[in-house]
Image (spheres, coloured by chain):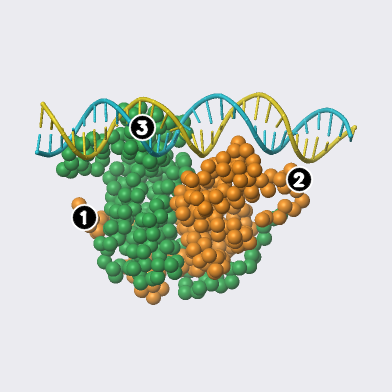
Chain colours: A green, B orange, C yellow, D cyan
Amino acid sequence: MTIDEGLGRRDRKKRQTRAALAAAALRLVAERGLDQVTVEEISEAADVSARTFFNYFATKDDALTGDTEGDRERVLRALDTVPAQVPALRAIRLALAGVIDEVEGDAALWLLRMQVVMQHPVLLARLVSGNAATEQAMVEALAARTGHSCDDGYPALVVAVTGAALRTAMVRWATGGGARPLAELLDEAFAAVAAGLPDPRTGGVVDPTTDPPGATASGGQRTPVRKRP
Amino acid sequence: MTIDEGLGRRDRKKRQTRAALAAAALRLVAERGLDQVTVEEISEAADVSARTFFNYFATKDDALTGDTEGDRERVLRALDTVPAQVPALRAIRLALAGVIDEVEGDAALWLLRMQVVMQHPVLLARLVSGNAATEQAMVEALAARTGHSCDDGYPALVVAVTGAALRTAMVRWATGGGARPLAELLDEAFAAVAAGLPDPRTGGVVDPTTDPPGATASGGQRTPVRKRP
DNA sequence: AACAAAGATGCAGGCACTGCAAACTTGCGC
DNA sequence: GCGCAAGTTTGCAGTGCCTGCATCTTTGTT
């Protein structure tokens, strides 16, 4: 649980209620499945009215995924503090450190959360992809950092790909029951991405049949693959 | 519109109804926004009852995103037809050719669809990420192809990253109003991924401060970035 | 203790979505 | 053509998510 440093009774209670609702939601859904649990039951378990539930979470799903928007904003702020000369991929990896720490610090909660989320793809999508505004801010920050134009595609691609890397690392972490540190799995994923996802059979070297790095295009219009009718 | 080759009147009508519903949904939501349009209104516009809408689409969202599940299955089948010795990334790029053709063949529909989807992040997530079963099948196919174990992380990472590449390419395609061919944009994205998303300031060479390709981990546990309190 | 701000709750209502049963259409064999 | 079987459409009733509004209770302050 995050520390409630220097807050009045009021805000402390709010935090408690929010945490209680989230915990109840996770526990119940883990037991019975997403649509076998009603908001009423969750509220009951947290000992508040159903109407109050919606004072804390906009949707039932939000109680399960946690504050993803807040997390994204934290990553964005962290990215600001990384020196400008650090290359893009590594900068993002560093900016993710805070979130990683939080997840590993609350391992039990997050393992349960991932277990639930993985059983309900609708939630999995919400977990990493999401808000347009913050995502766009991330793209802009990266564009400024690398000197790219915002719409030449590179920054957006990097954001999307690192998001995918984070997601797979978290899934792998949860699948293994948290045995291997999340930070380690994330480093592996980032290393593989930085290496260009080499096909292992080519010995880690970029395959010569692949398009050269700087190429803008190379005739992908044709359809060399035949699909049955 | 896809060709209704050799189908009875019945199935032809079904296709028509389905297309009418999808088109009506896209048009109305583009005009007014997602929650200013009811299923009833969509059905009205397509001249069927509201109940019938749900015979065609499980959710309102599904009418907007199109048959993503079917598309994924097609990609999966296409992957089967790519010779085993083709390296992973390129194999996936080839397997995507069929879907790319479909999108560019129905450019008007898909541009509208992307416009709508991009304005509603909930839909954007559904568009590429999604079903667990097919996604898992894709991971397994890739694992078999590359000789990887299914749970060593590499195949899942490749699937997630290429999904991200496809998504960004489609967004870029739609943002540009379809001016540049989707196939070309996708090739660019794949090329960038294959090159390891090089920070342009390092001249396309993998930065030496990055983890070496084969490394399993390198002490990412510490938190070198300070966030304000 | 009194007051103001903020939170919790109940209630009414809109809308997504589902199961069921009753029409209705279509394809097919006669 | 006729009628049957199978498939489709539709209405209806019901559940559950979610919202706006009015009211009551709690909390922090003077």
In the image, which is nearer the foreground, mark 1 or mark 3?
A: 3
Q: Looking at the image, which residue is at 50% across and 50% down? A: B32
Q: Looking at the image, which residue is at 55% across and 57% down? A: B112
Residue hosting label 2: B9
What SS does tag 3 mark?
Answer: helix
- Nearest the viewer among D11 and A154 is D11
Q: Can residue A167 be spotted in the picture?
A: no
- Nearest the viewer among A55 and A161 is A55
In the image, which is nearer the foreground, mark 1 or mark 2?
A: 2
> Given the image, what chain letter belongs to the residue carrying mark 3?
A
Q: Amino acid at mark 3?
A: Arg
Image quadrant assignment for residue C17: top right
Tell whether B61 sits left or right of A17.
right
- How far is mark 1 from mark 3, CA to CA? 35 Å
The percent coordinates of residue C2 (x first, y second) are 13, 29
Q: Is residue A32 above or below residue B81?
A: above
Do discs 3 and 2 belong to a common subunit? no
- Nearest the viewer among A108 and D7 is D7
Q: Amino acid at mark 1?
A: Arg
Q: Looking at the image, which residue is at 52% across and 57% down? A: B114
In the image, which is nearer the foreground, mark 3 or mark 2?
A: 3
Quarter of the image for the N terminus of chain A: give it.
top left
Say which mark, if any, is on residue A51. Answer: 3
> Given the image, what chain letter belongs to the residue carrying mark 2?
B
Do discs 1 and 2 belong to a common subunit? yes
Mark earlier in primary sequence (1, 2): 2
What SS does tag 2 mark?
Answer: helix
Q: Amino acid at mark 2?
A: Arg
The percent coordinates of residue A143 (x first, y second) are 37, 67
Q: Can residue B227 be spotted in the picture?
A: yes
Residue hosting label 1: B228
